[in-house]
Image: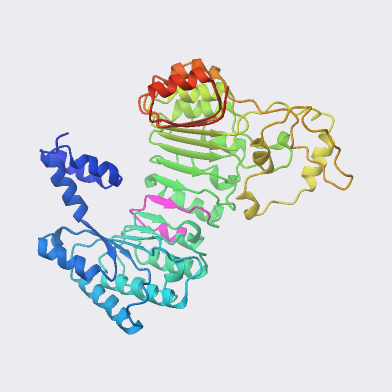
Amino acid sequence: MDGASPAAAAIIERVISYLDKKTVRACETLNKAWYTLVTVQSVRNIDTHILQLPLRIAHYRRKGLLGSARALTIDVSFVEGFLSTAAYERRVRDAAILVSKVPGIRTLSVHATGLHSAPSNDEIHSGVMAVDCLLRALPQLSTLDMSECPVALLDPSGASLNGLTQLRHIRWFTLGRNDMTSAAALARLVASNTQTLEAVDGQADITDMVLRQLCNAPKFRRLNARGSNITDDSLLTLVRARGSQLTELVLSDCTRLTRRSIGHLTPEHLPRLQVLDLYNVVVTTDTYQALFNQRMYWPYLRDLKLKAAVLHVSPQRDERVNDDILVAIGQNCPRLVALRLFGCHGITDAGLSAILGNLGDLRELVVMHHAEDPVSGAEEGSEEVSETVTSAPEPSGLLLSLPSINDIWATIPSLPANAVPHRAPPPSAPSTPCLSSQPRRGFTSQALQHGVRSRRFNLLNLDMAYDSVCAEHLAQLSHLQVLCGRVITRHAKSLLESQFPKCKMMVWNID
């Protein structure tokens, strides 16, 4: 694509905004058309500190580029030492007045470089004033990004947010400790933009009230509620009202959600879903099977992230993602590009083979914690384990957001039998039936017996012992950049290094 035709230029302008700086600089050297398009795209975003904003706007006006500016990335961190408080505030207000005269600004990204977790009163005062002035000066915003701005810089009254009524995309505060003030401000902002809103990345500040308001948003498509306290009723209400148009649903670490709502996240209710994140959500194998089985066809799903929640101390009581679910994913998710599975203890070579052999568009595959060897003595201690599990209290949200003892123990390499003398635990120590005396099994070359259908893998993170057979299959890939595993033989390592000289291999042991 040389960029000369109007259609090619329109596509390139869209693509450039997703590229990193190194790739953009490489694109500039292709030809004159690419250089022109990259230059135009770069000047559309004014990236500067708020005190330098008047000089940057004057530079754009002098070059005749001010009319092409579409986005504003502002650093509102406090600069002390050379201006009095009154002069600093006056400079900030003057910058906001100049910004209000740039009619094309539709996107505002605010960040505070170097602002630590315990900002001083001057930093908070100057930051709150800068954010308030910018929001009041740009009522025509369609995108508001506050994700890299500390929540301490939010005006408690939220008066500056009242003038924003045309927002389409909201990325809320993620730095600092979010409290009910920021959650209430987000709810008011969503309520005033329901007719235009398309995406909300509110994470922990998403509440049941926000979800009920989003039910009245006719254009809403993407939700990121990571770490929030939303309940089953509010999620079910949103899915029933707007499920037919949702394309992205991130529910990781939402520990109050149960099978009652997660079980309804099916293709019947979410026919256009492209991204689904259920990391660390309390669901069981039956719930996963309700979402991914031979009858559930996901035509547009591209990014899937799952973590089996471990509710019990004993590994015999762990809820598992088994091979049947992976076979269903391999057959019914044809457009899957990224698959990440964590804490999935029931996966074997057969399940991994179903994924690698069926998904032709897959580029990222992460499978952490797979099938374990049977625990010796499990039958004899089954009654004791059952009694321990029954008396265990219900885990809280904080505990569920942390890795389980099974996951932590699984990452510790097993020692030889004669390395450390066995010592019985003291009588007062609680029993730990989850600790296995046998090492875990890694994936083997049998997982590649049906080959690797996708040739465009960028990342492979498998608990696998890579041998020469694995290396021969992986050598057919064309874009491998990161390879992680348990063990790799020297011959396989040399073969992969010759095929992928820039590939980063992070393997525990070299055999």
Q: Is residue 486 left or right of residue 132?
A: right
Location of the C terminus by quadrant is: top right
Q: Is residue 211 left or right of residue 21?
A: right
- Residue 337, position as x, y percentages in the image: 40, 33
Seen from this angle, which residue lies furthest bottom? Answer: 86
Residue 218 highlighted magenta (yes or no):
yes
Q: Is residue 113 left or right of residue 461?
A: left
Seen from this angle, which residue lies furthest right? Answer: 427
Q: 114 or 341, which lies in front? A: 114
At 53% across and 33% down in the image, what residue appears? 367
Location of the N terminus by quadrant is: top left
Q: Does residue 270 appear in the picture of this structure?
A: no
Residue 219 highlighted magenta (yes or no):
yes
Q: 121 or 457, which lies in front? A: 121
At 32% across and 84% down in the image, what residue appears? 86
Q: Does residue 198 appear in the picture of this structure?
A: yes
- Residue 12, position as x, y percentages in the image: 20, 42
Q: 39 or 500, which lies in front? A: 500
Q: 510 or 42, which lies in front? A: 510
Region of the chain picked out in magenta, as a range = 211-227
Residue 389 in which image quadrant: top right
Instruction: Identify whether 237 is placed above or below 7.
Output: below
- Residue 331, position as x, y percentages in the image: 46, 25
Instruction: Identify whether 62 is placed above or below 286.
Output: below
At 22% across and 75% down in the image, what residue appears? 97
